[in-house]
Image (tube, rainbow, N blue to C red):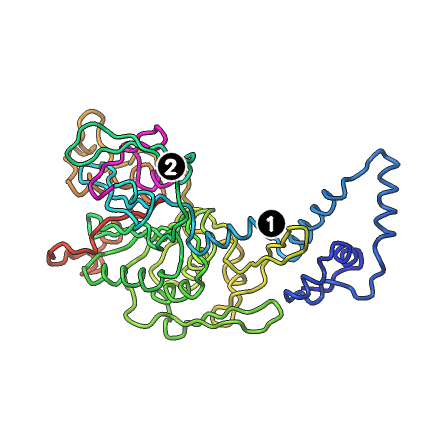
Amino acid sequence: MSRACPPVARALRALGVASALVAAGFAAAADAEAPDPSAEFEALQTVLRRYGLDPDPAALSGGLREAVARAVDPDGRVLTVAELEALRAARRGRAPDLGLLLERTPEGQVALAGTIEDSPAARAGLVRGVLLESVGGRYVADRGLDEVVRMLREAETPVQLEVVEPGVSAPRALELSPAVLARPSIATAEAWPRRLAYLRLDGLFDDAAPAVAARLRDWQEEGRFGVILDLRGAGGERIDAAAALAGLLAERPEEYTLAVEAMDGSAVEEFMAVAGERVSMPVMTLIDGRTEGAAELLAALLRASGRGVMLIGAATAGDYGLREGIPVGDDAVLYVRTRRILLDGHEISEVIGGRVRPHLAVEGRARPDDGERAPTPGTGRNRNGREPSPDDRALRLRIRDDAALQRAADILLGLKAMDRFLPGVGAEPTPAAPSDADARRQAVP
C-alpha cells in the first residue's frame, strides 16, 4: 500500500485503526509524525454546526471505518465480531442444515436418498424413498433440485414440510428446525443420460480435494463424455483444494504452482497440482454472484489455466477467501484482503482481474427450447414431428427452467456430436453395469 496522506493518517490514528493495519502488513497505513487529530475534528464540527449540522459521533466513526476498509481493499467492508464468526463457520462448511439427501425419481418426483447421520431429518425418522411434497406450503414436484435447495435454505424456521412415506398415499406434515452440521463438499453428483454428468458443490471444505477428484476420475473411467461443475452459491476456505482440483485440468500440469503471499511480500504457503491421472473430459463450470471463497478461487484458476474448461453464468462475488478480520475495537473488524495469490509467479488478479467473469454470460430463467427439442404444443412431439427419446425427455426434465444449465448441457451435446469431425469423440462406450458412482444425491439444509 502506498504511503497514506496526512489527513487519512490522522483519521486512522483517531479511530485506533492504524496500529491494526500495520500489524496486518499494511506498513505505510499511518504517519508516525502526524499531529494529534482532535483539533482538526473539533474545527470540522464547528463548521458543520454553523449550518445546523451535528454529526453523530458513532455514525461518523462507522462511516470512516467503512471508508478505510475500501481504501485498502475496494471490496472490503466492516463486520461485527459475530458476523465474522458466522462467515468463518460457513466457510468451514458448518451451517444450519436439515440433513436431507435428495434425488430425482424416474417419474420426476423429489425423493429422499437418505439423511445425514444424527441430523434433524434423521431424528424425525425420514428414510430413503420418502417423497418430498412441499416446503413452506409450496409444492416442489415441478421444480428443479437446485430450486428445492434454495427453498429449504430460505424457508422460515421451523421449516414446514409435507412428505409421503413408502406405502402410504396421504402426505404427512412435519416441522423441522435446522441444526448446525458439517456439510459435505459435494451437494449433488448425478449421472445423466447421453453420457453427461453433473456435480454441484456446496463449497471446498475439508473433504473437497479427494472427494471431487475421485468422482471426476470415476466418471472418466466409466466413459462419461463431459461434466457440468456447478459452483453457483459455493464457498469454502480450502485454498489447497482449489489448487489441487484446478491442477487436474491445468493446461501445463507439470508446471502448475500456486503461492499465497502476504501483502508485505512474505511467502505464506505454496501448493502443487494433485498427483495422478488428469481429467481429460470437457468441463462446463457454472458460476454466479454467490460464488465466493475457495470455490471462486477454483473458478479463477480454471479461467486462467484450465484446459477444456468453459465458464458459464455471471461474474463471481470478488472474495477469494484471502480476507481476514482486523479488530479495530467496539465490536468492529475490518474485513479486508491481507493476502494475494500468485499463479506461476503472476498475481492472479492481474491475470483475470477482480471478479471472475464467465466466457459465456447467461442469467435468468430459461426460455422455451428452440428447434427440434421444443415440443409442438398439444402433441408432445418435436417440431420436426419426431417423438423425443426417453433420454431426451429425462435430460430436459432435469435442466428445465435453468438457463445456464441448459446452455452447458447444449454445449456438451454439441461437442459430443462432433465425432464426424473428431473421430472417436462421440463414440458410445460398451454398456457397463450400474455402479454407486451413478447415485444421484444432494445435501441440503
- Give the structural element (helix, strand or loop) at label 1: strand
Rendered view: 168 above or below 284 = above
In the rendered image, residue 254 lying in the magenta stretch gets the answer no
Task: Please identify the quadrant where the N terminus is shown.
Answer: bottom right
Between residues 32 and 133, which one lies in front from this camera angle? 133
In the rendered image, residue 142 lying in the magenta stretch gets the answer yes
Q: Amino acid at mark 1?
A: Leu
Rendered view: 172 above or below 309 = above
Q: Amino acid at mark 2?
A: Met
Rendered view: 232 above or below 2 = above
Q: What x and y, as percent, mark residue 99?
A: 33, 46
Q: In this view of the protein, can residue 91 be seen by the observer?
A: yes
Residue 79, label in figure: 1
Between residues 118 and 432, which one lies in front from this camera angle? 118
Tell me how far mark 2 sits from mark 1, CA to CA.
27 Å
**Which residue is pictured at 42% across the width and 38% down the height?**
154
Residue 151, label in figure: 2
Task: Please identify the quadrant where the C terminus is shown.
Answer: top left
Task: Say whether residue 413 is left or right of residue 254.
Answer: left
Between residues 359 and 93, which one lies in front from this camera angle? 93
Asked which quadrant contains residue 15, the reply is bottom right
- Give the structural element (helix, strand or loop) at label 2: helix
Rendered view: 164 above or below 299 = above
What segment is highlighted magenta in the picture?
A: 126-150
Between residues 218 and 420, which one lies in front from this camera angle? 218
Crowding near the residue tagged with mark 1, few <14, some 14–19, many ≥20 C-alpha atoms within 10 Å: some
Asked which quadrant contains residue 426, the reply is bottom left
Crowding near the residue tagged with mark 2, few <14, some 14–19, many ≥20 C-alpha atoms within 10 Å: some
Residue 189, label in figure: none
**Which residue is pictured at 72% across the width and 60% down the height?**
18
Q: Earlier in the sequence, mark 2 or mark 1?
A: 1
Q: What x and y, as percent, mark residue 360?
A: 40, 49
